[in-house]
Image (cartoon, helix red, strand yellow):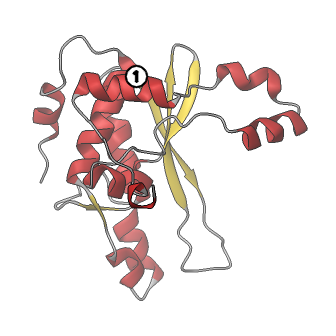
Amino acid sequence: MIDYDKLLNSIPEGLNQIEIARFLYIELGKYFIYDPDVFAAQDIETRKKIAYRGINEITNNKVVCISLSKIYTELLRRCGINAETVYIPGDPNDPKDIGHAFTQIDIDGKEGSVELIRDLTNIKVGLKTEYFLPSITEEKMKEAEKRGLLDKIDTVLTLDDSELREIDDKIGYTYNRSIFRWCD
């Protein structure tokens, strides 16, 4: 089992809040794996029991989006970073759909989302991550414009590739390869 206090004490000195959030994201991503038991379980109550475990109920390195988001949120809060687990309920007509969760962070009045569960494989094999404060794509900009939300775009916390690379270099997470490199 991961020692959360030891992890928090291993945060390098001099990091700002975004860098601390990134450091924890990478370190948790190195440790945890997705728990396939949640979908192997035959009944919904067993699935929920696995999915909704709290930070102290995880006795191995297996998690799902909800449990991992809770862990990440708790550690961010211990570091003084405003964070919450956002839960999107599943389809009530589909007993197999237990929903999805991600972490919302608020730094300097800007909010951003992270989905560590989706980056576990990238982190494990040393690739660039895709779900840590992702930049706003052209498609998302068009959707914001269509919904009359362009004035809110400047309150969204995102990082572009160069900003993310700078932080990763600072915390020692390097990736020099692409999963598609063999196609070059």
Where in the figure is residue 112, as x and y percent of width and height? 55, 31
Image height check: is 92 above or below 142?
below
Quarter of the image for the C terminus: give it. bottom left
Residue bearing the label numbered 1 = 18
- At mark 1, the secondary structure is helix
Query: Which quadrant would residue 143 be assigned to in this image?
Result: top right
Where in the figure is residue 50, as x and y percent of width and height? 34, 69
Query: Which quadrant would residue 59 be assigned to in this image?
Result: bottom left
Q: Is residue 124 left or right of residue 151?
A: left
Q: Is residue 25 left or right of residue 136?
A: left
Callout 1, which amino acid? Ile
Query: Which quadrant would residue 148 be assigned to in this image?
Result: top right
Q: Nearer the viewer, residue 148 or 125?
A: 125
Residue appearing at x 29%, y 40% in the figure: 26
Which residue is at the far bottom?
42
Image height check: is 136 above or below 38?
above
Residue 114 seen in the figure: yes
Image height check: is 79 above or below 66?
above
Where in the figure is residue 89, as x and y percent of width and height? 60, 60
Residue 56 seen in the figure: no
Residue appearing at x 57%, y 15% in the figure: 109
Residue appearing at x 15%, y 35% in the figure: 7
Which residue is at the far top?
14
Pointer 1: residues within 10 angstroms few (<14), some, or many (20+)?
some
Looking at the image, how many numbered discs can be counted on the residues?
Answer: 1
